[in-house]
Image (spheres, rainbow, N blue to C red):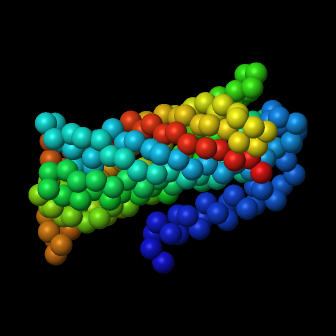
């Protein structure tokens, strides 16, 4: 089993244990805690090989599931995102699998949320400038938040923003996988997303 699938399996097992516990009275409409299913568009501020002078954003999709509250607005969340593009003559096909905590706070009809997530990011091997080979997996963290605006009892429009960290490096060759970094290779990214949340 590939490491990134093991990460997803661990998140799913952990989440099932949490959801099996009795959910406390929540801040959601009606006083009942719900699962949340999210899907939408996402924008990443740079490509993975976007050195100074060669920076450009990536577009993609995002999906997430958040589980009923475990304590006063705090819930466990699994988040995925996929980005696809080209920069410096190299494909940029990156995907994230992360899990962590989301905290919700209601203000009137709106719900503000913050999130702290960690997990794995994978990418095609020839992502470096001019298709130089690189690492295909890295640890990643995602911190940020957003706003849910309800359009019905069960559906809301979500807008969010995050600060993303990863630690990809290039490698000497497919035979010699010693990692190295070139000046300006990005570690930090901004991420903006918008889509629909369904509560069930």
- Number of residue marks: 0
User: Whole-percent x and y of residue 40?
Assistant: 53, 47
Residue lying farthest front? 151
Is residue 139 something that shows in the picture?
no
User: Whole-percent x and y of residue 128?
Assistant: 18, 56
User: Whole-percent x and y of residue 199?
Assistant: 74, 47
Residue at the location (44% across, 44% down)? 42
Say which of 53 and 19 sits in front. Answer: 53
User: Whole-percent x and y of residue 149?
Assistant: 66, 31
Considering only vertical position in the picture, is 95 above or below 52? below
58 sits to left or right of 131: right
Residue lying farthest top? 108
Residue at the location (33% across, 55% down)? 84
Considering only vertical position in the picture, is 131 above or below 145? below
Considering only vertical position in the picture, is 55 above or below 149? below
Say which of 152 and 69 sits in front. Answer: 152
Residue at the location (73% across, 62% down)? 16
Residue at the location (52% across, 39% down)? 194
Q: Quadrant of residue 55?
A: top left
Is residue 85 something that shows in the picture?
yes
53 sits to left or right of 44: left
28 sits to left or right of 4: right
Q: Quadrant of residue 148?
A: top right
Residue lying farthest bottom? 1
């Amino acid at each position: 089993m590939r490491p990134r699938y093991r990460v997803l399996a661990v998140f799913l097992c952990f989440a099932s244990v949490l959801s099996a516990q009795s959910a406390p009275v929540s801040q959601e409409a009606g006083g009942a805690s719900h699962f949340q299913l999210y899907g939408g568009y996402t924008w990443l501020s740079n490509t993975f090989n976007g050195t100074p002078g060669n920076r450009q954003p990536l577009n993609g999709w995002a999906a997430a599931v958040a589980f009923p509250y475990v304590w006063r607005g705090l819930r466990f969340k699994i988040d995925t995102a996929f980005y696809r593009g080209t920069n410096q003559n190299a494909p940029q096909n990156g995907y994230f699998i992360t899990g962590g905590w989301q905290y919700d706070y209601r203000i009137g009809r709106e719900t503000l949320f913050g999130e702290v997530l960690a997990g794995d990011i994978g990418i095609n091997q020839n992502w470096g400038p001019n298709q130089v080979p690189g690492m295909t997996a890295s640890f990643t963290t995602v911190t940020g938040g957003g706003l849910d605006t309800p359009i019905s009892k069960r559906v809301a429009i979500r807008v969010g923003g995050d600060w993303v960290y990863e630690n990809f490096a290039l490698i000497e060759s497919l035979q010699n996988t010693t990692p190295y970094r070139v000046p300006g290779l990005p570690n930090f990214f901004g991420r903006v997303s918008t889509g629909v949340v369904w509560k069930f």
